[in-house]
């Protein structure tokens, strides 16, 4: 089962703005009319219930959205780049770029995980009373890009947990159409299996989780890897063999693993199921149920004894599960085709575009840092003297020049912004590019 994947996503680059001047039969030198570049496309995750796991993301791992079109003359703007869509199954959690997190749970839910770059403005936008014929335009910006991690956590209303051989898979087979393998040796089930419990007006999804043994949290047996799938189950169905060697110890060991997993799994409502009821006489089974109720006090929702072989207690268990999963919270209650909407995301480190820092890195060399400033610089072709003059003007307006001066800058010193480095000679059109962007 592919429940993890790592993919590379890249928003499309924005199209470049255009340098162009109007040409008309009777107008010798027309005004600027270069159009803007189009925005690059986004990489978008879409929650698709027909996907079962993340296997397809192991075959194709690179996703790039389309480039924005370049602007053209006559004020024609470039087209927006095409989006790239990645389909993921419900239950996918994403560790995205810039520490953004997404949870795709409901069919149709979308998350933009890599936004396309902005298109550059055409020269028309830079025309003003002091600059009537700008011979420069902005370049389009790169889209966001990077590797992101995806993890599938199955969505089930209730999870079957217990030690190996407790009878979990047999119970799932008995209660649903799912057909997990059943055998008389531990760890028959090596990956979670889902089944659907059908009621008159409701369906509930049941997950068979591979057996847990003592030390699972430290990696013993199959480890607690699969407990991640239980994280979203509203109800735990804990199976203990009624005629096992040490039923109390078995119950405690699994409870301990749930606790050490660390996501609060031990706090989930639990139904205690004494399995393989047919292995003890009927009256003995009833006595044991009473004993377990006493022992657990109010900590379990209920205690039941069932047999997957002859079906005793199965109907009571169905009703207990139905009562244990609150109405409206069922996983399968989500309508199959919801209108598309944005997945919520949490930003752990919001990145402001405002503000900048100036630092003197060595004699005669200064570095200006700040996302807004870096974007501004990246948008201009600084080998074009007019574009460089425009950038200098903006640096003056924003207050960067003043900050540079108070840090000891003198005209002619080297200034670094992002990947650019240039000699800055304010108010003189002779500034020189030292290094081009990599
Ligand atoms: N007599 C009897 N045997 C059962 C019952 N349920 C399961 N078994 C037997 O117990 C053994 C283990 O059953 P499984 O359903 O594979 O147990 P499991 O909990 O899924 O085991 P793992 O997948 O290894 O963790 C098999 O030999 C089953 O036939 C039952 O209700 N009565
Ligand atoms: Mg099993």
Image (cartoon, rainbow, N blue to C red):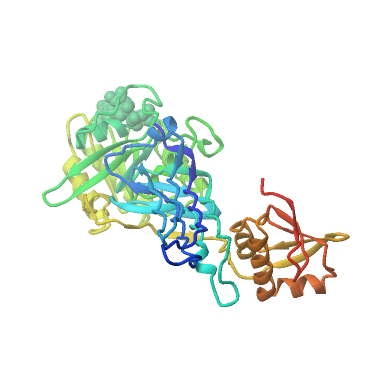
Q: Residue at image x 25%, y 57%?
A: 339
Residue lying at the far left in this picture: please name it. Answer: 200
Residue lying at the far front in this picture: please name it. Answer: 26
The quadrant of the image that shows the C terminus is top right
Q: Nearer the viewer, residue 186 or 426?
A: 426
Q: Picture coordinates of residue 124 (x, y %)?
A: 49, 66
Q: In the rendered view, tell whether residue 363 sits above or below residue 177.
A: below
Taking the image as shown, residue 276 lies to the left or right of residue 258, namely left
Q: Nearer the viewer, residue 117 or 87?
A: 117
Taking the image as shown, residue 206 lies to the left or right of residue 57, namely left
Q: In the rendered view, tell whether residue 264 sits above or below residue 245.
A: below
Q: Is residue 269 visible?
A: no
Residue lying at the far right in this picture: please name it. Answer: 363
Q: Is residue 159 visible?
A: yes
Q: Residue at image x 65%, y 57%?
A: 384
Q: Picture coordinates of residue 293 (x, y %)?
A: 32, 50
Q: In the rendered view, tell whether residue 252 sits above or below residue 132.
A: above
Q: Quadrant of ligand 1?
A: top left
Q: Picture coordinates of residue 365 (x, y %)?
A: 82, 59
């Amino acid at each position: 089962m592919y429940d993890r994947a790592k993919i590379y996503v890249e928003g499309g680059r924005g199209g470049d703005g255009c340098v162009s001047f109007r040409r008309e039969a009777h107008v010798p030198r027309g005004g600027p009319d270069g159009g803007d570049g189009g925005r690059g496309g986004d990489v978008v995750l879409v929650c698709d219930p027909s996907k079962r796991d993340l296997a397809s993301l192991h075959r194709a791992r690179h996703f790039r959205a389309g480039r924005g079109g370049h602007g053209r003359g006559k004020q024609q703007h470039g087209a927006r780049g095409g989006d790239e869509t990645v389909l993921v199954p419900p239950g996918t959690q994403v560790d995205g770029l810039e520490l953004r997190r997404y949870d795709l749970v409901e069919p149709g839910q979308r998350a933009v995980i890599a936004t396309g770059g902005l298109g550059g403005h055409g020269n028309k936008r830079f025309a003003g009373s002091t600059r009537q014929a700008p011979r420069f335009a902005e370049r389009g910006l790169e889209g966001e890009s990077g590797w992101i991690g995806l993890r599938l956590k199955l969505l089930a209303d209730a999870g079957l947990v217990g030690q190996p051989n407790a009878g979990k898979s047999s119970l799932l087979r008995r209660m649903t159409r799912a057909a997990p393998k059943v055998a008389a040796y531990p760890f028959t089930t090596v990956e979670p299996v889902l089944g659907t419990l059908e009621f008159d007006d409701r369906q509930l999804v049941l997950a068979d989780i591979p057996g847990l043994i003592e030390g699972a949290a430290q990696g013993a047996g199959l480890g607690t890897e699969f407990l991640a799938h239980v994280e979203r189950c509203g109800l735990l169905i804990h199976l203990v063999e009624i005629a096992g060697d040490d039923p109390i110890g078995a119950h405690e060991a699994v409870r301990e693993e749930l606790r050490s997993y660390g996501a609060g799994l031990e706090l989930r409502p639990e139904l205690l199921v004494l399995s393989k009821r047919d292995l003890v006489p009927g009256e003995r089974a009833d006595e044991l149920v009473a004993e377990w109720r006493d022992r657990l006090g109010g900590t379990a929702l209920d205690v039941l004894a069932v047999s997957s072989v002859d079906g005793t207690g199965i109907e009571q268990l169905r009703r207990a599960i139905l009562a244990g999963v609150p109405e409206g919270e069922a996983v399968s209650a989500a309508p199959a085709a919801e209108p598309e909407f944005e997945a919520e995301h949490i930003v752990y480190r919001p990145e402001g575009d405002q503000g900048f820092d100036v630092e003197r890195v060595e004699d005669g060399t200064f570095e200006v840092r700040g996302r807004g400033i870096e974007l501004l610089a990246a948008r201009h072709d600084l080998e074009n003297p007019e574009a460089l003059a425009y950038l200098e003007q903006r640096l003056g307006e924003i207050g960067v020049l003043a900050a540079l001066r108070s840090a000891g800058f003198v005209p002619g010193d080297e200034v670094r912004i992002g990947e650019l480095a240039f000699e800055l000679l304010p108010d003189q059109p002779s500034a020189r590019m030292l290094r081009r962007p990599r």
